[in-house]
Structures are given as structure tokens and as C-alpha cells.
């Protein structure tokens, strides 16, 4: 019992450490992505934390299989390299008991991943879609502005700069705005430049936004030509296209597992449902694969043993991605689906276990 608790603690500590590091790394990547969206006016800055938090359960479900796989390799590999595993075998804790312990740990983590994939992630994805499509997501342009920085719209037809924002972020000072215009009889685009002392946004019931500038000048013309106009004004309203950001996740990800099952004949729905189960299945199969990989090279450094193990993981996961695309594109049948990938993994595990037996027989 003490040995079981000791090995369980070692594996769980490695699992927690690896998963946390990977999760933080991927979250930082998502933060940078959303900051870029905010910089070009696709999302307001006040919902950045909410959007990043929506990514946590999805990333956790994808990283737990890898975390458990590498955790077992590192924990057991360190014990083998330091001959602790050999001492445990002398006291009767053989490979079969080690397999049973790993089997129990794999089932527990697989159950957690299954809950995340089948229920938590669809719920979170639906909530995320609601936020993106709600009326509150109709962006206030001024909320996306960063003082002292030129900001270019996603289509490249608008450049905006403000020197300073009021404390309540309702008014901007020293505004520069360049907006492109398409001309029917010209190959090149005309541009409108606005330079004003102040600017603020007006409320509108439509999707478009209106930015009011005061005490400024408007320049209109085609770059490279001298026939441009200059207009001085006291107040000028600029119509701005909506900067609304649409949900980047597919609609299928927000559907419940029951809805996917009811529409299983649809290849895209079937691919999504099989993907949810496949992540959980891969958690269990990868954990069971780690044991024979270690048994084949018991005295090897745990870090060196990670190299072929990581390569196997990359091949496995990429085959799942390929199988998913094939189902969606109708290349393979829904019946075959992603199950052939797990079948190959299972065959590989059996072959690795047979290899362990052959090595033992030769060493006798």
C-alpha cells in the first residue's frame, strides 16, 4: 500500500507539473492572439480575461493525455534509472502490479478527460459563442483604441491614432484617422484623412458605428495626385464599419453530445463526436503504452527515453487529425472513422509487450 501511494504520488506530481507548464505556455499564446484581435479592433479589451478563461477546459482536455503519458515516462523512468524499480521488484512489486497501478491511474484521468470533452467543453463553447454573438459584443470603437499607437483595421482600409484618452475612455484627444474609399472610375483607391482635436463615439442601434470628431480638418484625394480637397469643420461624423468578431470555434463544438449523436449521419457531426471520444481513448492507450516503452530500455535515461515516446505521440495525434479531416471530407466512412487509428495504437502496444517478453526470454 505504501509503495502504491508512493508511485501514485510520483506520477501525479509529474502529471501536474507537465500539464501546468504546457497549459501556461498555450494560454500565453492565446493571450497574444486575443491581444492582436484587440489591437485591430475586433474585440474590446474588457472581455479578454473572459475569452482566455474559455480556453482553459479545452486546452486541459487536450494536454492531459500528453501530461499523463510523459508523467509516467518521467516518473517510472527516473525510478528505473536510479534502480529504485529494481528494489521494488525485489520486494514483490513486479511489472504486473505496476501495470495494474498504471491501469487505475489511466482510467481515472481518462474519466476526467471524458467529462471535459463530452460535457464541459460543449457547454463552455456554447457560452463563448453567446458572448461573441450577443449585443454586448457590438464593439465600441473607442474601447479598442490604444493611445500613442497607430492601429490598422483587419482589411487594411482604416488607420487610426489617438494621442490620449480620457480617464473614463469616452473621449479621445488629437485624433488621426485615415480611411480608404473605392472609386468606380479609378483603379486606385481614394483616401480620406481626418485630423481633429477631439473625438467621441455616438450610440447607434445599427451594427455600424459613428465616430464624431470636433475642431479638425478633412483631406480627400488619391495618393500621388494633386487634386485633393481640404475642409475645415467644427464637427464631423465618420461612419465606421462594425469591428465585431465572429466566433473562431466551429459551431459543432458548441453542440451537446446528445445533439451530435442524433445527427450522427452527418459527417461533420460524426467527426466531432468521434473526436471527443478519441481524446479520452488516447489518454488511456498512451498511458498503457508508456510501460512497455520503459521496460524495453529500463536503464536508459528518462530524458533520452522521451525522444522516441514524443515521436510516437506526434504520429498518433496527427493521425487522429488526419482521420477527422477524412471523415468531414467523406474520404473514409463514418463506420471506420477514427477507430482505425486507435486500432493501430492498440496493435503497437501489443507488439511492444511482446517485445518485452522476448527481451526477458533472451536475458534468461
Image (cartoon, rainbow, N blue to C red):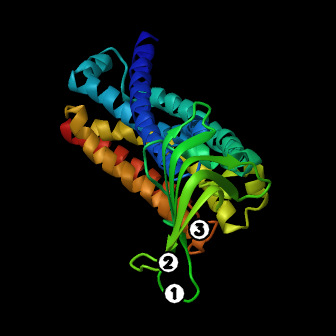
Depth check: give the residue in front, 145 or 262.
145
Residue 209: x and y in percent read 69, 56
User: Can you say which quadrant of the picture contains the C terminus?
Assistant: top left
Task: Compare marks 3 and 1 and give the one earlier in the sequence.
Answer: 1
Task: Compare marks 2 and 3 and give the one earlier in the sequence.
Answer: 2
Q: Secondary structure at mark 1?
A: loop
Image point (61%, 40%), residue name: 171
Closer to viewer: mark 3 or mark 1: 1
The numbered mark at residue 298 is: none
Depth check: give the residue in front, 13 or 58.
58
Residue 292: x and y in percent read 34, 40
Please give left or right for residue 244 compared with residue 18 in the image.
Answer: right
Q: Residues within 10 Å of mark 2 (few under 14, many from 20)?
A: some
Q: Is residue 34 above or below residue 13?
A: below
Residue 69 in sight: yes
The residue positioned farthest toward the top in the image shown:
2
Q: Badge 1 is on which residue?
A: 186
Closer to viewer: mark 2 or mark 3: 2
Residue 17: x and y in percent read 39, 26
Depth check: give the residue in front, 55 or 269.
55
Q: Secondary structure at mark 3?
A: helix
**Real-space Cα separation, disc 2 to disc 3, in angstroms:** 44 Å
Image point (38%, 78%), residue name: 224
**Real-space Cα separation, disc 1 to disc 2, in angstroms:** 7 Å
Q: Badge 2 is on which residue?
A: 189
Please give left or right for residue 319 compared with residue 211 in the image.
Answer: left
Depth check: give the residue in front, 36 or 91.
36
Residue 31: x and y in percent read 48, 41
Q: Badge 3 is on which residue?
A: 327
Image point (77%, 54%), residue name: 259
Verify CB contact (< 8 Å) between mark 1 and mark 2. Answer: yes
Q: Residues within 10 Å of mark 1 (few under 14, many from 20)?
A: few
Amino acid at each position: 500500500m505504501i509503495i502504491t501511494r508512493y508511485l501514485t504520488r510520483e506520477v501525479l506530481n509529474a502529471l501536474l507539473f507537465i500539464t501546468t507548464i504546457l497549459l501556461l505556455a498555450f494560454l500565453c499564446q492565446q493571450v497574444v492572439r486575443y491581444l492582436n484581435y484587440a489591437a485591430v479592433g475586433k474585440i474590446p479589451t474588457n472581455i479578454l480575461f473572459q475569452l482566455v478563461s474559455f480556453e482553459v477546459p479545452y486546452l486541459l482536455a487536450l494536454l492531459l493525455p500528453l501530461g499523463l503519458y510523459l508523467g509516467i515516462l518521467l516518473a517510472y523512468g527516473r525510478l528505473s534509472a536510479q534502480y529504485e524499480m529494481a528494489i521494488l521488484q525485489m520486494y514483490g512489486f513486479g511489472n504486473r502490479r505496476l501495470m495494474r497501478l498504471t491501469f487505475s491511474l489511466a482510467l481515472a484521468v481518462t474519466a476526467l478527460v471524458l467529462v471535459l470533452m463530452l460535457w464541459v467543453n460543449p457547454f463552455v463553447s456554447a457560452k463563448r459563442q453567446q458572448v461573441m454573438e450577443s449585443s454586448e459584443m457590438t464593439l465600441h470603437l473607442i474601447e479598442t483604441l490604444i493611445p500613442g499607437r497607430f492601429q490598422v483595421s483587419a482589411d487594411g482600409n482604416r488607420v487610426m491614432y489617438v494621442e490620449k484618452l480620457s480617464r473614463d475612455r469616452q473621449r479621445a484627444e488629437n485624433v488621426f484617422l485615415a480611411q480608404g474609399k473605392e472609386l468606380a472610375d479609378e483603379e486606385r483607391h481614394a483616401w480620406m484623412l481626418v485630423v481633429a482635436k477631439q473625438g467621441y463615439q455616438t450610440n447607434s442601434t445599427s451594427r455600424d458605428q459613428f465616430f464624431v470628431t470636433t475642431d479638425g480638418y478633412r483631406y480627400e484625394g488619391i495618393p500621388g495626385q494633386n487634386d485633393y480637397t481640404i475642409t475645415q469643420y467644427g464637427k464631423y461624423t465618420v461612419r465606421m464599419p462594425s469591428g465585431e468578431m465572429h466566433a473562431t470555434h466551429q459551431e459543432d463544438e458548441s453542440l451537446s453530445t446528445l445533439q451530435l449523436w442524433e445527427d450522427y449521419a452527418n459527417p461533420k457531426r460524426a467527426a466531432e463526436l468521434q473526436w471527443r471520444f478519441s481524446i479520452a481513448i488516447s489518454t488511456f492507450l498512451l498511458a498503457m503504452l508508456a510501460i512497455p516503452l520503459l521496460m524495453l530500455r529500463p536503464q536508459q535515461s528518462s530524458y533520452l527515453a522521451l525522444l522516441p515516446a514524443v515521436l510516437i505521440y506526434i504520429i498518433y495525434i496527427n493521425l487522429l487529425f488526419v482521420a477527422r479531416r477524412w471523415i468531414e471530407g467523406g474520404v473514409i466512412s463514418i463506420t471506420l472513422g477514427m477507430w482505425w487509428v486507435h486500432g493501430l495504437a492498440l496493435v503497437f502496444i501489443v507488439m511492444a509487450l511482446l517485445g518485452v517478453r522476448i527481451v526477458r526470454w533472451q536475458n534468461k
